[in-house]
Image (spheres, helix red, strand yellow):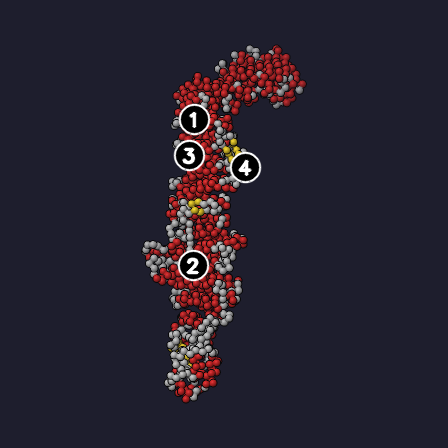
Amino acid sequence: MSSFCNQIEEIKSLIYSNKSLAYSTLSHLQEQSVNDPSLLQTLADNSQDLVSLITVDISIDDEEVAAQALKCSGFMIYHPSLVSTIPVDDANLVLEALAKVIMSTKIKSVCNLGVWCISMQQFEASILVGCFNSVLQAVVHALDNPIGSLSTTFEAMQAVMKLAAQLSERMRESSHIWAPPVFRRLLSIDKRERDISERCLLKIRPTIIPPPPALSKALAEDMKLKLLTVMKDLLNQGLKIQTLQAWGWFIRLQGSHAMKYRHLTNDMLKVPEKTFSDHNPQVQIASLVAWEGLVDAFIHPALLTSETNEPIKNGIQQVRTSGGSSCQIQASGFSKSIKLIMTPLIGIISSKCDVSVYSSCLKTWCYLLHKLDISVNHPWVIELVLDPIFGAVFRFGPDVKTFWLWNLCLDLLDDFILAKCRNLDHETSSQVSHHSTPIKWLPWTIGQLDFLVKMMDIIISHASIATITPENRSSACDAALKIFRSFLKGVQMDFRSSSTKYNDIMLCLNTLLRFIKKICEDVTSEGGRSSELHHTSLQFLEAVVQDLEPSILGSPLYKVSLNFTCIHLQMVDNIRNVKYLGISSVAYMDMVSPLVYLSVLYICVVIPSTPATRGMELLLQGLRRFFKTILLLYDPVENLSVAVGLLYKHMEFRHLDIWTAIAKGLEDFFNGLTVKDLSLLKMDSNRDFPRAVCHLLSYPFVVCSCSWPTQKKDSGSLKESLVSPERKLKLQQVAEVWKSLYGALCASKFNKFSETSSLTEELCSMLNGCVDQNISMLDHGTEQYFHRDDIGLTYLSGTAVTCVMEQQILTLAASSVGNNVEHARDPKTFSGIKNSLEFSSRFLKLSWSMMEADPSTILFVTSRVFSVLVCFVRCLHTKPSILSFIETISCPLLQWLSHRETQEASTNEQLHHLWSEILSCLRRCQPPIVFDSSLLKLQAPLLEKTLDHPKSTISELTVTFWNSTYGKQIKLDYPESLLDILDKLSRNKRINLQTKSLPFLVKCHSISEVTAQRSRVTATNSRNSKRVELVEDTANQFEPENRLGSSSKRKRVGLTEHQKEVRRAQQGRGMDCSGHGPGIRTYTSVDFSQGNEDSQESQEIRDPESILELLRRTA
């Protein structure tokens, strides 16, 4: 430390004797002090003395000494540890000395070092203020560069930048003094001077932009005198880029006074006017960069403030002009300025240019957006600034060359839309920026709806271009969907706001739906060429349903018209084929809720699609999600009815895919319901929903019965297509979905939707009508029916019968219906079962008629139906249910019991089980069934086929049943159809016709009527019935005279008491076995008595025991 002090003292002494050595030694110590704190501290302690000595020597004429002294002085006033120790007075002396040296010296190096010292000094601003004028004068002298040294110019501009950083306001006020020497060099022939000047201006830009009036005036004078002429000369010489660089700064430094100097400005604008149309991309880019100077000149805070009286109110921009005419004039001027700025930008972005030019154009445009501040949200600013650029860039599409531009504009537009959803307590701004200052987006209003919809329409339009690549189409769809979802968030905020008026809501809805309609109509018109566009259009619909307020979309207050052409063109009236279902549908121009509008639109987009459409599976998955959503969030009754009505207007086989998706959506809906939700849907007053469900379940059957061709085709190819594996697979899929949906409905307890009605009851009633139509056509050979080989309806009916009867089995098993006689006799109880049985009966008849189309499939389905009917019969225990089953099923069962070579083993087995269960249930009925003539008449057709059936298992089963039931009865009227088979089987000793003999029958008959030891079949005259009397050889039981007497001719006299009793017995009427009214008369007028056949006498009924007792007394 002591050595350092000694060295400093020596230096002080040497300054007076050998200045060169002294300053070289001091300079060396200063270099060492950088890394030596102790030496630095020594210098600080002696700084005052050293500075005083150095200040004197910087002005001497010796170049070497002056240069060394300036270097040492520069270090002393630069280093923070040293400059802080210099007293204010000494600092002022130093600055004054430096200014004097710069202005007085003729030595270039000394001048350069003097300016360098000013650019390096670290004095406080308060110290500089005291010497500001002197210092500034010295710097301007250096800028003028009388010596002509480029290094001097460089150091002078460095000094300007230093002073601007330290004394910004003072430098701004005096900019008209020091700035002209700087900007004049922008037109220098020397590139180094131009570069130094531009670098300086960029550094001090915050100080001089916007320019003070004095600076603008100084520039205007220079432009008029010389600069404008020089620019034109340089332009003519081909130095376009250099000229444009200068032009940009000149117009920027004119600022708001550019409009004041209108003629000068117009002359200046002729320069870029020539360069914008230049074919050289570099010249065009330079023009665009220079154009930012015009943005700075025309867009300034004072003008923006006057344009926006109330920037933000309640989070919504209120941009309006003040009441005075001066503000209107300013607004008009502002609008003209914007148009002027935008003219070349729109021209470039709309023309064919190099990508780099497009990029530069967009940067200049973004710079304008930042400069506009909150005025960027003004309606006419959106119209003049945003609309043309967004539109032009979005029309480029997501091409590889313009992908950067596309993404930038997408992000800007998305930020603009999302500004409505940001927290309004914080400043809203864009996250996409090329500048430090963000774009100040504010919440958009309903007035911007058309602008936003227009931009989204341009974006999505690329997806429908036939020549676009799949990647670009996908990018366009994704971008449009992203922007649309952001848009919906803003619309949702308006819907939820209590301040939003009804008319504004309707405006939003109409604008939104009009946009959606256009997209969907484009999809339907282009014929499904783009699966991507198909999928995206449906995603748009799903987004609306998911993101917007349900209370608005489903409200009856907001009605819109079904005014889209696709529903008008697609909906051919097929309802005429299914009038018995009572289906209604929406029509073109109906007034509906927004949700119904969206639902109809969704289905109309999907319906034209075919299984061959690319992405069809995605479309169907989307339809399933959409349908589930609208059922859960909105009125399920209305939406299901609308969907079903639309389906029934499209009844081709391919539309079963649409039905499948809707059915799965309905199943998902039921699986997600609560008990409370179900109770609301099952109200008696809400019968529309169950009816719509039944219509939906009936749709596949109607399609398979109504989708006949209108023109004849080759029968061979038609049959081949109808029994093709693809069609069978589709039928299997539809059957599985139908089964799953029906099962879900039953599992949710929705099947029993009221005390008196059930889903199964109504469903079977509808399906019966459908099957009846087909059976009628088969029976009458209707000419329109060309699909005799179409097994679709048969296959689906078999599946439905199986499901329905399984559900009936569960119903009977879970209740007391089977064992509760009083409940069983209630007609309402079995109405559902009756419809189910009738459906089963119709299926068996239909399947028998369609056997030749596809025997293996028909037999397989029929076997399953027989199996479930077997289980169903096991659940029957009461007479009404058993007789109802037999009466309903007899006709088709009779057909299947007929011998047919094509029957397979499993079908025969199930048929045998069914017949066995039918006979068993008759015998186990409680209370027991009386096997009388009326029941025999009902069973006669089946017994005729089964008593002597070719299948021994069936015939033996039936014979056993006969012997245990009818074979034990005494009095029976045998139907004529059974006489042959009964005669044959009785003669073969296989059946019993009665189990005991009645001798009194022989006694009461004449001898001529007795035939010993065999059966006698006698025709009666009453009611065309037959009577069979079995008489054994009783000759040994009666005396001859009695037999002879009984064979004599009857006398036509009044009846004896005995004859009256017999007549009363043979003409008696009574209740049948079921107690349902007059029984069947079992005897004819050919009887035991001699009486008149025409006797009308009738007495009360007597039982057989009473008659036998009377006969004995008479004998």
Query: For the residues marked 2 and 4, what is the alpha-carbon distance in whole angstroms?
Result: 58 Å
| Nearer the observer, 520 or 617 | 520
Does residue 816 appear to the left or right of 534 in the view shown? right
Q: Quadrant of the C terminus?
A: bottom left
Instruction: Give me the disc on residue 287.
Output: 1
Residue identified by numbered label 3: 392
Q: Secondary structure at mark 1?
A: helix
Q: Which mark is residue 423?
A: 4
Nearer the observer, 329 or 1005: 329
Q: Nearer the viewer, mark 1 or mark 4?
A: 4
Please name which of the two marks, 2 or 3, marks the residue nearer to the observer: 2
Q: Nearer the viewer, mark 3 or mark 1?
A: 3
Which numbered disc, 3 or 4, marks the residue that appears first in the sequence?
3
Dot 2 falls on a residue whose secondary structure is helix
Evaluate if marks 2 and 3 touch, with contact meaning CB atoms under 8 Å apart: no
Q: Amino acid at mark 1?
A: Ser
Q: Residues within 10 Å of mark 1 (few under 14, many from 20)?
A: many
Spatial CA distance of label 3 from label 4 is: 31 Å
Q: Residues within 10 Å of mark 2 (few under 14, many from 20)?
A: many
